[in-house]
Image (cartoon, rainbow, N blue to C red):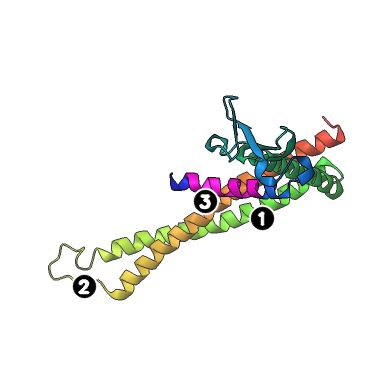
Amino acid sequence: MPKDTIRLLIPVALAAQLAAGAAPAAAGGSPHDAFYRCKNAKGESFVGQAIPEECLGADIEVLDQRSHLLRVIPGQRSTEQVNQQQADADAKTAAAQRDRTLLATYLSVADIERLRDQRLELLEQQAFVTHQYIQNLRARQARLMQDVQRYRPYSPNANAPALPDTVAEELVNTVNGLQVYEQELAKNTVEQQRLRRDFGADIARFKELKGLQ
């Protein structure tokens, strides 16, 4: 039997064993008299004194000798459904909390727009400063690229001096600095887009909660 099948079958078998052990004697004999029944995705039924292999992943009914249902062992699909239901409930609770926070934080659409504009202005100022740094670094890079042409191995002059370590280091630092500031500018742009999107959603939801047009 494949390892994956064995791994999935173990918890089902353990659950069935616990279910059988928990079955009351009055419900129909000893725990070993229990039967297991399930249906596959096609609706076909399988019954056995041991859990049928076809029941893997499906809900398993534990029956006594009189075919009375003792309990149901949830299968993988049922577990997934329960998890999805819980996730949906959590999302609904979180959405309700966001609505309460939205109404408690703002009195009008203008309040939301004012905070949005303040945060956008801060980001735009940061972007402006970053852009200035980038321009300065690009100018320095251009100057250094011209400067290195005077040194070996970039100069066509066979008698040109070797490239000084200080010049090479400055060029490397300039290129690295450009990469850092360009990444920061890109992050700033993404953050501005996210901020506009989030505040736009807040404004739309606030209008909906307040019945505004």
Q: Amino acid at mark 2?
A: Ala
Q: Secondary structure at mark 2?
A: loop
Residue 142 locus on image (x, y percent): 35, 59
Quadrant hosting residue 84: top right
Instruction: Report whether residue 200 is seen.
Output: no
Q: Amino acid at mark 1?
A: Leu
Q: Secondary structure at mark 3?
A: helix
Q: Amino acid at mark 3?
A: Ala
Instruction: Report whether residue 98 is seen.
Output: yes
Which part of the image, by quadrant, shows the N terminus? top left
Mark 3 and mark 1 residues within 8 Å of each other at the beta carbon: no
Alpha-carbon span between mark 3 and mark 1: 15 Å
Which part of the image, by quadrant, shows the C terminus? top right
Q: Is residue 15 magenta?
A: yes
Counting residues from the N terminus, which is met first, the one under dot 1 or under dot 2?
1
Mark 1 and mark 2 residues within 8 Å of each other at the beta carbon: no
Residue 144 locus on image (x, y percent): 33, 64
Q: Nearest to the eye among marks 2 and 3: give it.
A: 3
Alpha-carbon span between mark 1 and mark 2: 46 Å
Q: Outermost residue toward the front? A: 29
Q: Which residue is mark 3?
A: 186
Q: Which residue is mark 1?
A: 122
Q: Is residue 145 magenta?
A: no
Read off the magenta span: 5-17
Q: Which residue is mark 2?
A: 162
State left or right for residue 66 relative to residue 151: right
Residue 41 locus on image (x, y percent): 57, 28
State left or right for residue 106 relative to residue 30: right
